[in-house]
Amino acid sequence: MDKQYVEEAGVPVGWPVVVGTVPVLASAFQPREVLRQAVDEARGHGRSVVLASDAPHGEQSRSGTRASVQVMSGGGGVGKSQLAAAYARDAVEGGADLVVWTSATDIQQVLTVYAQAAALVQAPGLTGTDLEADARAFVNWLAATDRRWLVVLDDITNPDAIDPWWPDSQRGTGWTLATTRLKDPRLTGGGRARIDVDVYTPAEATGYLTARLTHDRKAHLIDHQAPALAEALGHLPLALGHAAAYMLRESASCSAYLERFADRATHLDELLPHWADAERYGRQVTTTLLLALDATDQDPHGPLARAALRIAAFLDPAGQPADLWTTNAFLTYLTQEHPTVPARRNRVLRRRRTSAARTVTGDEALAALRLLDRYGLITYDSSIDSLRAVRIHALTARALRETIPQDQQPATAVTAADALIEIWPDPDHTQRELASTLRTNTDSLTTHAGESLWMPDARFVAHPVLYGAGVSLLNAHLHGTASTYWEHMVADCERLLGNEHPDTLTARANLATSYQQAGRTNDAINLLERVLADRERLLGSEHPDTLSARNVLHRWRSAGGDSGEPPL
């Protein structure tokens, strides 16, 4: 599935175009014909679209003026994204002109991919600088084009945020497929159809195990306990994937794995009682996760792998940059967590019976990631998309976070934040995709870190990544998202630092900038006047921050609110 990019206006677009990274189908992928039939029937019922492979270029549907939209809804780990990926790959192979894949957990990621697509298809109205304007240009292009297209919105978490950005097709040649854990009526308005996705059927679950083990020439591991194992795992695709990876690596039969699973599940009662399992299948995933980690511990890189997995669990499941895993922050964390690591093999060190205390290297860190990938705990591949080289299923990440001791969580969160800042370009507006990936990872981190990134008595008050993410939103001209972000930051600063702390004043100044960019000139000027008065009183009239606020306020008043004003 080759991506075809166009970098200069006026250069003919090289169709077909694929935007975003479509996930690779899992080994022994189950086609799930009943589910596919439900999706296809939902699309056909409205007769509002022609699938890319169903008709010649430009042919319209019988009655449609709206794009067909199907929303696959189901719990974590049931295989929604895999089924969507199968449709995306079928669309490319079937002759679609455009396939777009984007994570929809955060609306800014959707807008970034839309803006990238606008540039690739040369959508009218493209600015190249305003992310929201370019995203809107792409949506408008989708509505008007007679090109055949498919847009996949994977894992919608905020129905209100996505509502203005649903693709439409006046020509009836495009369709949209979305996945979500929600069963929210807002996702099915406007003619959108919901398809409920559940776990594998017993036959599909057993078929998966059989196909997976046979594919890797380990058919002898399949025995009479295969159906019982599938049932113990709740027929959950994610848990079955964990189990199959373990069985292949450890040459464990279905019977052997079932016995180990049952033993681990018994001990899990203390860690995760049945009543605490908010996810319907959280216990199965946690048990398979712990079994896999027990196995990785036997590898020389096992302790490093366990530490790396903790970091991954705090970041964006949809993708984490390759460069993050060789940063000084991450390597220092690995070294501190496991100060004794296997010594390099050479003639001198081979004579030593003890391990050498030294700094963990980048190669060792990447070896730890490869180990996690082999056991199916993450997906690691920097050759396809270096910005999202590491992926982890959200349910795996949650299960892992629940096993991290409370006293280890702050250090884990701060390390992730340090690593993000270390690779964050300044300025970042010329690297849209990287900036968007860093922002979504920061958003995930702040969601799970609680107040670990606020340390009044440590080397920082609020971690710089909190301010970096907000400034990045301003640089990207994501006006609404930036205003919401800085409103929350101001509230957190006032609560944790007080109304007169310099960081609180900085947050208010950036909130004023977001208002000014959004065209709320009066609100921006009024807020910045308050910031200026506080800085003059608390910092002095000649302090650099005071001078900056005074100069910006003067320009805003003179220009009536110039939208190009940089953040303070």
Image (tube, rainbow, N blue to C red):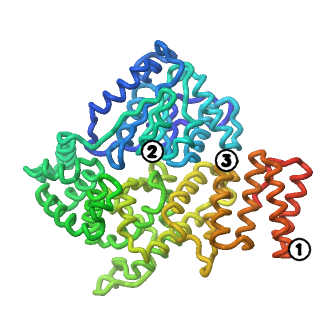
Q: Residues within 10 Å of mark 1 (few under 14, many from 20)?
A: few
What amino acid is at disc 1? Answer: Glu
Residue ranking furthest to the front: 275
* Viewer-side residue, 187 vs 85: 187
Q: Check disc 3 and give the amino acid type.
A: Gly
Left or right, 154 with respect to 166, comes to left
At 36% from the left and 29% from the top, the residue drawn is: 39
Q: Position of residue 133 (x, y in %)?
A: 68, 38
Q: Which residue is mark 1?
A: 542
Badge 3 vs badge 1, beta-carbon distance below 8 Å: no
Determine which quarter of the picture holds residue 34. top left
Residue 212 seen anywhere in this rendered image of the structure:
yes
| Residue 427 at x, y percent in the picture | 69, 57
Quarter of the image with the C terminus in it = bottom right
Residues tagged 1 and 2 counted as in contact (Cβ below 8 A): no
Q: Is residue 2 visible?
A: no
